[in-house]
Structures are given as C-alpha cells and as structure tokens.
Image (cartoon, helix red, strand yellow):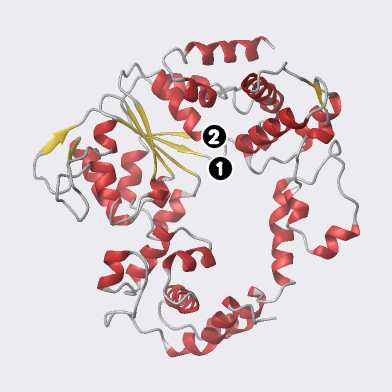
Amino acid sequence: MSSLVESIQSSHHSLSRLSAADQCKATAAIFVDSNSCALPRRIDRLAPSDASILIIGETGTGKEIAARQIHERSGRTGPFVAVNCGALSESLGEAALFGHEAGAYTGASGARAGWFEAANGGTLFLDEIGDLPLMLQVALLRVLQERQVVRLGSRKPVPIDIRVIAATNIDVSKAVANGQFRLDLYFRLSVATLDLPPLRVRTGDILPLAEHFIAVYSSRVKAPVPRLETDAQAALLNHAWPGNIRELENVMHAAVLVRTGNVIRAEDLRLVDWSRAAAPPSQQTATEATPAGAPQRPIEWARPRALDAIAATPGSLQSLTPQLDRLFESPPDQLLENLQSLVIRQAMERCKGNQVHTARLLGVSRNVLRTYLKRFGLLSEGAERSGLRVVKPSSAAPEIPHPVRRQIGPYAGALFAGEVA
C-alpha cells in the first residue's frame, strides 16, 4: 500500500506544470505490480539525458503517458508536443513536421512552423512511428543527425533543440526486415528503449488504476467516489484486457455513469470476452455466457479460435493452401515478392484503385499500402500527387511469373469477393 501511495504522490509532484487536460493523462502512471514497478526508476534514469528513446508496447499500454513522465522529469522548459505519425500523408507530412514557407505548395498562403519548431526547447513525441512513410523516414533521419530543419520552400536551416521520443506497437525488427522501416533510423531513435508490459501481465496495477479512473470521472460529474464491490474487483482481475489501460479507463468511465447508489458492482462493468467473441457461432452457443466475476480464458487463446473461425467461413484462406503447395514444389524466383505483388494488385482491382478502401481490405494503413505500391511500380504520376487512386500499373511494374498468376490469381480475386468456400 505504501508503494502505491508513493507512486501516486510522485506522479502528482511531477504534474505541477501540466495543464488540467494533460494531468488526467499523466496521473494514470501508476506502477505497483512487480512487472511494472521498475518502470519509474528506468524513467528517472533516462529522463535527464537528451538521448532519443523508443517506447515499445501494445496499443493502450500508456506509451504517451510514459513519454510525458520522461518530459516532466527531464528538466526541459519547452512544451511536450505529440504527433501521430499514422496520420501524416507522404505528400503533406514534410510540411507538417518541418514547416513551410508561403507558396511552397498550392494552398500555402503563409509561412508556418512545423511540429519540430513547435517543440523547440522541449520534447517531440512521435507516436506510431512504424506508420511513417519511407520518404519521411529519410527526412526525419537527416533532421535527427543535423539537429536543424529546413522548411518546405526554403533553403535556410533552422536550429532546433528538442528531445525526440518515439513509440510503436509493432515489431520494428520485422518492419526493418520487410523493408517498411529504415534500419539507420531505428538505431537513431532507439538510443534507449522502454518496454511497457501489457496490463494482463501487471495485474497488481489493475485495481489501483481502476480506483484512479473512478475518482477522475466521479470528479468530472461532481459525484461522490463510489466503492468497488468485491465481485467487481474479481471481474476486473479476471478480465484479459486486450485493450490494456485504455480499455480499463473506458470500462470504469461507463461504470461511474451507470452505477446505482454509491457502489460499483460486477453488473455495472461492460466487459467483453474477446476470446469468445472471436470464436465461431457454434462454439459461442455451445456454452453459456461467462459471468462477470468468473475466470475468463486468457487472451492468448483468441488467436487459434479466430483462425478456426476464418477456416469455417466463406472466402477462406485455407482454399489457397493446395495452390501454394503446388508452387512450393517448383517455386519460381522471388516467390514471396511475387505473391505480395499479386495480392496487392488483386486488392486494388477489387477496390477499383481506391487506396483507402484497399488498405482497409488488407488490414494495413494507407501509408503501408503506398509503400508496397511504390515497390511494385503501381503508382502512376497522377496517383502519386493525389494519393487517391492508382490508374494503371506503370510500364516499369515487374511482371508476375506465369505460375504464380495461374495458381494463385483466380483464388486471390475470389477470396476478396467472398466467393471461395
């Protein structure tokens, strides 16, 4: 209990210079569990330096909270500026990050500083750095090396004094191996790393965090702070928390609003068993719903059950297996590269060249899709400028070997159309 009090007191001490909106985010930095209690000490060791830090963790684990803690303990007097790299387009991302002069591009009626200049003297937090387009990765690497920016449309460098903290929820080593992330940029960003464990392995933090969010949202509605009943505590501890701290915050926010009286019971908690939600309908109806306070299947089981669901539905990936086996018996050159190209082409054809729809169909961000389109020579000049559609493959687009097209092509197209059983 004393460690919890010290953790909360330390958090409140570091909040004295934060705005009210930022305080709500930063006070969720509660580390009591044995799997997380070392994080504050590591943050304290990393904060005073100017070294770049890469924070790695699943979605909702509190990467921005950790970045804010590092900034507040760094002694830097400038602002903390957070940028979502996944929202930066390749065409306008450079202007957003580094600024632009008047007339630098159509619609640029005046000069404007970018995020790097806005964070001067403070900390720039680059969230979802794994989604940054490759061309912007090159520009970012140069800025980190030179410690100066050049606005779009200008030749005059502007010196900057910032500390860069990046965050990602992807396996960066795999992204580097797949050509989606530059190795030299990875080394530049990861002078130090901070790994945030998921909430399901730091169960000792669940109830303190729940109490914190109850107090925050009760204060917002000017209501007394309710008490967590024993059955509600058991339900919280038994939940798998695939959405981590963000999911816990939303659950407690809803519970504060719907509770009756001055207690929160298990029935007030909107908990979804995602492992059962991913199961086929036959498995869902074979057993009764899990009571809120009963132990749930660990989240690790969601993956195989989800794969079973895929195998049992139309448009199954399993239908491709015989065709792949035939290819493996006599594989053409660069088989994986050609398969990727074929899937991208078929998906683009299915979506009539719309990049947004194609990215959604493939389950990737548009920036990742554009990386593949460039690699396979599928971006026309007009599409490169507009970022909306691919008209036709360029003449430089590599031809897919006939065996790959013959074996996989018809099945890939039917798969996207939901026609393969």
Quarter occupied by residue 6: top right
Residue 131 showing in the rendered view:
yes
Amino acid type assigned to the residue bearing label 1 in the image:
Glu
Q: Can you see residue 198?
A: no
The C terminus, quarter of image = bottom right
* Residue position for label 2: 196
Is 90 situated above or below 124?
Answer: below
Whether residue 374 sits left or right of residue 228 in the image: it is: left
Relative height, residue 237 to residue 91 (above, below): above
The disc at residue 206 is none
Lateral position of residue 65 relative to residue 395, left or right: right
Q: Mark 2 and mark 1: span between their CA atoms?
A: 8 Å
Image quarter of residue 388: bottom left
Where's residue 305, x and y in %? 74, 59
State the SS at label 2. Answer: loop
Q: Which mark is residue 58?
A: 1
Q: Which amino acid, by three-letter code, is at mark 2? A: Leu
Q: Position of residue 138 (x, y in %)?
A: 26, 51
- Indicate left or right for 413 with 139 as reference: right
- Which residue sits at x=68%, y=23%? 214
**Where the N terminus falls, by quadrant?**
top right
